[in-house]
Amino acid sequence: MTTTHEHELTSGVRIPLVGFGTYLIPDDEAATAVESALVAGYRHVDTAEVYENETGVGGGLRRGMRQAGLERDDIFVTTKLWPLTQERNKTAAEAARSLDESLERLGLEQVDLYLIHAPFGREQRLEQWQALAEAYENGKARAIGVSNFNATHIDELIEAGLPVPHANQIELHPWSQKPELVAYLNHKRIMPIAYSSLAPLSTWRTAPGHASGKTQEMRAEGERSDHPFKKLADTYGVTEAQFLLGWGVQNGYPVLPKSTDPDRMRQNLDVFSFRIEDADMDYIRSLDRGPGLAWGEVDPITSS
């Protein structure tokens, strides 16, 4: 069992291992969801410029902190730079302006972690990363990182003489384990943060407009009574979601479950009361299917 509910980034900032994900929560619903999450016990909230819900998230942070009697230092907030304008990749100046706009929407003077959302355009990646490095130096972000970057993308930053990212947020779950990339990140002391941890579930992204690369065959597989994660969850006396999240935190990855149901929110936090046995962890390694599902047919982590 994981012995701490936080891990330390190389910047010295401690990141809670279970965060509240807000992807696909509309702005007008985000405040209530985030408030409920903080009251339920979450201390890490993840959003992004492209989610178009930072205003609601900011309102939820303020309401939830009042409700739960929390100070700003008790909360870890992540947001992300969307690297594109409608016509092209953002320049360094535009990236810096995007952070200021995110901070204004969130109602914060500083975020705990600021990420480049995806690696679009080599030259612009370098420019944008320089802007994030400056944001870190001037205190607008306590830690900086990337998302959906592969080892080549990160090596480009390092070879350009720029700082090593503190984190890389990537799709990680038993169907997409990325062992080579995770080994690289561990070697570089870059924290892997997992999103789409619940992708193997039949209910993952089933609503209209929630696109993914998941096939109908995969969905049907998840509904079968002999689905491996149902059987494993039953063995440990937990839900499938708890089991999948527990797999992530046992590997040392902060995870970002999303639910607007307060009971599920609380369930998703309860992932530290069981330990997956080594034999089952070995078995799960055999279930890896390679590339992820979250981006559908366009996977920036395998792009140039």
Image (tube, helix red, strand yellow):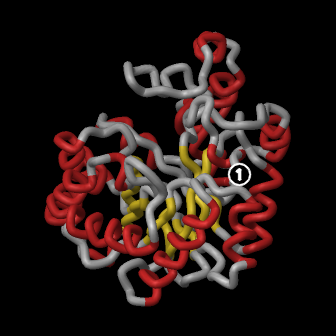
The residue labelled by disc 1 is: 304
Q: Position of residue 137 (x, y in %)?
A: 46, 89
Compared to residue 155, the image places residue 267 above or below, namely above
Name the one closer to the observer, 138 or 259: 138
**Residue depicted at 46% across the width and 53% down the height:** 88
Residue 182 seen from this side? yes
- Percent across and percent down for residue 3 are 62, 65
Viewed as shown, does residue 107 lie left or right of 265? left
**How many residues crowd around disc 1 within 10 Å: few (fewer than 14), some, or many (20 or more)?**
few
List the single residue furthest toward the bottom.
Answer: 138
Residue 245 found in image quarter: top right
Kind of residue at badge 1: Ser
* Residue 9 image point, x, y percent: 58, 75
Residue at (67, 73) in percent of width and height: 157
Query: Which quarter shows the N terminus?
Result: bottom right
Give the residue at x 75% y 67%. 186
**Taking 186 as reference, is 232 above or below it?**
above
Q: Secondary structure at mark 1?
A: loop
- What residue appears at the point 21 percent right and 68 percent down from the top-left corner? 104
Most foreground residue, 213 or 174: 213
Q: Residue furthest front?
A: 87
